[in-house]
Image (cartoon, grey):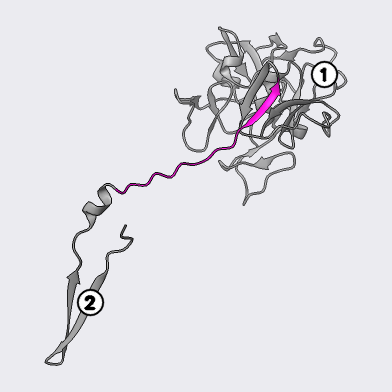
Amino acid sequence: MWCLVLFCIFLQKIKGEIIITEEKLPDLSKVYLNSTHVVHKRQIYYLCGTYPRQFYSLYPCYISGDANCSNGGKKLGVGCTIANQCVAYHSGPVACISGCCCTVPGTPNRDDTVPNGYGVCQNGQLSKVRCALPEHCQQGQRCLNGLCCTNTQDAYKTACGGEYSVAECSTTRQCTQGYVCTGSNFCCQCPVGKSSGRCNQGRCPAGFTCQANGWCCASCPNNVTPYGACLNQKCGGGRRCTSGNLCC
């Protein structure tokens, strides 16, 4: 197969002038019509979990050997990049550590006014059902700030860590530039919690990190899934109110 079309350039000097004439080789476009070469990309998948709950993951998961995580929890056998990907595989708090989903050891109760194990929705409702995606909640509920809460017409007002959402996500879970589609199906500046503002040359206040969309966002220590957003600076489930208005 021809890789190049060669051009022969001839220079002639006539009466002190340089004349450039171009002689082309025959048109080879027809040669290429039946010469299409398709290159297939290879993708590596990892078989994770334990039978009968096994599945393929794009990320490695190390359940064999040491089953302990560096935070003192146990490996769930699920690969991850963020903690929200682990919520569906454990009923309690989870963290994403070194590419593996891990359980999180129990933390002492931080708020005696709320029963232990329950988070608080922004409408004051108690919930102990964790979520990361809309489908993790039952019909009539919405995944708000990591908790399944009763869906209301004004849920958008507190969807972004207790602050307003600019809009709902599209049917393909997309948002306008600079915003991300969260588990609530609302567009926010941060995946979880509320931002502290725009990044300043890649820098953010303590407790926040600069995201790809240019906003400073927070997360719970060790990427633990938030247990809702703070309500009047308080949290349920034995969690504390931290940066980004997150219950961690």
Magenta highlight: main SS: loop
**Which residue is drawn at the image coordinates 68% and 42% (left, top)?**
209
Was residue 45 drawn as part of the magenta stretch in this picture?
Answer: yes
Query: Left of 99 or right of it: where is 116?
Result: right
Which residues fall within the magenta stretch?
A: 35-50
Disc 2: CA contacts within 10 A as few (<14), some (14-19) or many (>=20):
few
Q: Residue 238's mark?
A: 1
Residue 193 seen in the figure: no
Determine which quarter of the picture holds residue 182.
top right
Q: Which residue is mark 2?
A: 9
Q: Nearer the viewer, mark 2 or mark 1?
A: 2
Q: Secondary structure at mark 2?
A: strand
Seen at 79% across and 16% down, the residue is 237
Q: Is residue 33 above or below residue 163?
A: below
In the image, is residue 213 above or below residue 110?
Answer: below
For the residue pair 187 and 172, the one nearer the viewer reads as 172
Task: Pinpoint residue 33: horizontal percent, then vertical percent.
Answer: 25, 48
Residue 47 is situated, as x and y percent measured from the top left of the image, at 65, 28
Q: Position of residue 198 (x, y in %)?
A: 60, 42
Q: Amino acid at mark 1?
A: Gly
